[in-house]
Image (cartoon, rainbow, N blue to C red):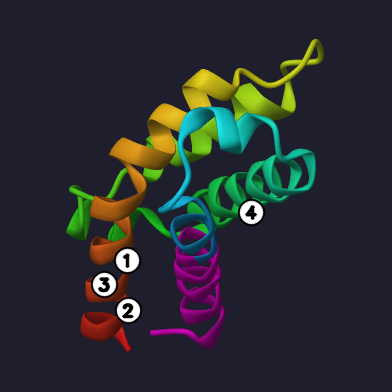
Amino acid sequence: MSPLLIEFLQHIENELSFIDKNTSELDFEEFVNNEILTKAIVRSFEIVGEACKKVPDEIRFKYPLFDWRGFAGLRDRMIHHYLGIDYALLWDAIKTEIPFNLLWIKLIIEREH
């Protein structure tokens, strides 16, 4: 596996870990009322989405349970939603997508490294 691919996968893992670590003990109100944290989480989702776009199709097809397209699409919706971020949508992704996909990206890195 190329060093660049490993770097993209590690960026994904690092950002998903950051999101999980910094939101696992919060409820929605605490999250939306913390402006610094919400901006950091949005940035983390942007990085994950961009890194997912850089992962070759060969890896995406090999590991279809990781939500490559979902993260890339969420990133695009956030970037192009000029009137603000839909924090309910973001919170739903944090609580439903992050734990599962964090486990998967760790497994992918372990298998491919």
Q: Which residue is mark 2?
A: 109
**Left or right of 41 on screen, residue 36:** right
Look at the numbered disc 1 and give the secondary structure of its residue: helix
What amino acid does circle 2 point to?
Ile
Q: Which residue is mark 3?
A: 108
Of the 4 image quadrants, the one containing the C terminus is bottom left
Above/below status of 50 relative to 102: above
Counting residues from the N terminus, which is met first, the one under dot 1 or under dot 4? Answer: 4
**Left or right of 59 on screen, residue 91:** right
Mark 1 and 2 residues: CB-CB less than 8 Å, in contact? Answer: yes
Tell me how far mark 1 sits from mark 3, CA to CA: 5 Å
Q: Position of residue 96 (x, y in %)?
A: 29, 37
Magenta portion: prevailing SS class: helix
Tell me how far mark 4 sits from mark 2, CA to CA: 17 Å
Q: Residue at x 80, y 10 (%)?
A: 83
How crowded is the residue under tag 2: few (<14 C-alpha within 10 Å), some, or many (20+)? Answer: some
How crowded is the residue under tag 4: few (<14 C-alpha within 10 Å), some, or many (20+)? Answer: many
Q: Which residue is mark 4?
A: 47
